[in-house]
Amino acid sequence: MTNSDNAPVLNRHVTLVGLMGVGKTTIGRRLARRLNADFADADEEVERAAGRSVSEIFADFGEAAFRDGERKVIARLLEEPAPMIIGLGGGAFINEETRALIKAQAISVWLKADLEVLVERVSRKPGARPLLAQGDPAEIMARLERERSPIYAQADIVVDTSVGSHEQSADQVLDALAQYQDSYAR
């Protein structure tokens, strides 16, 4: 189902999944604006709920505590009545329970990009990504890609964001959502 601008009309939440640096927040904000929907960044929502940054949560309580809070925040967002665009942290979809919630209540979109592109993007903000503080960022990103790609591949839609602007990637996602919703409705 589409509106007069040929943009899909959201009837379910849309979650954006993928590795850090792929553009989940930037593309998500553009999608939300174009679809006249709200946007939520799961990491920002976790920070708001915890009253501290993701880096502080990792440092003070560890990754397991962060993932538990993240799962709860995502479950809360998925309960919102109006469909919205939700940008997830890179590890959120990896959690089996979170993934099951998303599969039941949302359309999941895996935003992919070439590893070299991702490493270049995340290197622009040194210190902003707790997982990358544990060693060589390129090696960590390569490991995360190997570990997570088979799980990200379970997303409903896959969009490659390696080339082009964030606007072009948003166009690709809109097209993919329209096709997915049309086939889902049949």
Image (tube, rainbow, N blue to C red):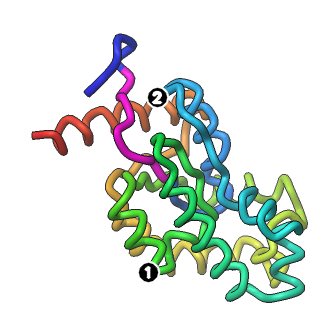
Residue 143 quadrant: bottom right
The spot of residue 32 in percent (x, y) is: 56, 33
Q: Is residue 33 magenta?
A: no
Q: Nearer the viewer, mark 2 or mark 1?
A: 1
Q: Is residue 47 left or right of residue 76?
A: right
Decide if residue 74 is in sight here.
yes
Image side of residue 129 versus residue 72, left or right:
right
| Residue for point 36% across, 29% down | 9
* Coordinates of residue 126 in the picture (x, y in percent): 89, 62
For mark 1, what is the residue? Answer: 96
Q: Amino acid at mark 2?
A: Asp
Residue 128 at x, y = what percent? 85, 63
What segment is highlighted magenta in the picture?
7-15
Does 9 lie within the magenta span?
yes
Which residue lies under the disc numbered 2?
A: 171
**SS majority, magenta:** loop
Classify the position of the N terminus by image quarter: top left
Q: Quadrant of residue 114?
A: bottom right
Mark sitting earlier along the chain (2/1):
1
* Neighbours of disc 2 within 10 Å: few (<14), some (14-19), many (20+): some
Q: Residues within 10 Å of mark 1 (few under 14, many from 20)?
A: few
> Which corner quadrant holds the C terminus?
top left
Asked whether, in this view, residue 14 is left or right of residue 36, the answer is: left
Depth check: give the residue in front, 105 or 53: 105
Mark 2–mark 1 distance (CA, rounded to whole Å):
29 Å
One can see residue 112 in this view: no
Instruction: Look at the picture and state if 127 lies above or below 39.
Output: below
Which of the labelled discs sits on residue 147, or is there none? none
